Image (cartoon, grey):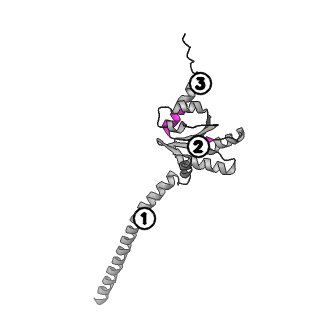
Amino acid sequence: MQVAQKQPRPEKVAEVAEIRELLSEGCVVLTDFQGLNVKEISALRGKLREVGSGYRVVKNTLFRLAAAKTPAARLAEGLVGPTGILYTKDDPVVAVKALEDFGKTAKLVRIKAGFVDGQVLTAEQVQELAKIPPKQQLYAMVVGGLQSPISNLVGTLQSTLGQLALTLQAIAEKKGAAA
């Protein structure tokens, strides 16, 4: 006697596909949102939306199915309790900072783990992301670092040229007075 195999519901299959897509496109941070009510989760979603990120509650079983046979499979190990995922295709630093800021004004959302650029991160490593300056600020720092020596060179050359011009003018005035 064969046991009929249960077919997954289409909405569950769609949700697994959505989670798998989030894992393949950017940064995902797993959180424990236990203790937050619907109003607070909505406020968190709004704050994250402002920085181009999102937040959704997922079932651990569906997350495990989505992460299976991907580099994020280790992320699903040991998932227990309610799980929410912060996701972004943009700068992960900005998203994690927004999550940390939310934790300062409301109940803390505990970070479980993260997945950024194909790397599984511990909760501590994700929290370290919040301490890094955002991409735009890092770009500005690099450009400033490159621009500084060039500006110094231009200033030195202008100063030397200015001194040469003054010297030539003084020589010309001296010869004009002697003639």
Percent x, y for residue 1? 55, 10
Upstream in the sequence, badge 1 or badge 2?
2
Percent x, y for residue 128? 54, 52
Viewer-nearest of discs 3 and 1? 3
The answer to which of 40 and 173 lies nearer the viewer is: 40
Residue 30: in magenta span: yes
Q: Residue furthest bottom?
A: 178
Find disc 3 in the rendering and name its residue. Answer: 11
Q: Which quadrant of the rendered structure holds the C terminus?
A: bottom left
Q: Is residue 11 above or below residue 95?
A: above
Q: Is residue 167 above or below residue 54?
A: below
The answer to which of 7 and 37 lies nearer the viewer is: 7
Q: Residue furthest front?
A: 1
The amino acid at mark 2 is Lys
How far, Cα to Cα, is label 1 from label 2?
Answer: 42 Å
Q: Give the residues drawn in magenta, as a range.
A: 18-32
The amino acid at mark 3 is Glu
The local crowd at label 2, few if under 14, some if 14 to 19, many if 20 or more residues have their Cα within 10 Å, is many
Asked if disc 3 and disc 1 are in contact, CB closer than 8 Å, the reply is no
Upstream in the sequence, badge 2 or badge 3?
3
Task: Identify which residue is drawn at 59% across, 43% down.
Answer: 112
Residue 59: in magenta span: no
Q: Secondary structure at mark 2?
A: strand
How far, Cα to Cα, is label 2 from label 3?
Answer: 26 Å
The local crowd at label 1, few if under 14, some if 14 to 19, many if 20 or more residues have their Cα within 10 Å, is few
Find disc 1 in the rendering and name its residue. Answer: 148
Find disc 2 in the rendering and name its residue. Answer: 112
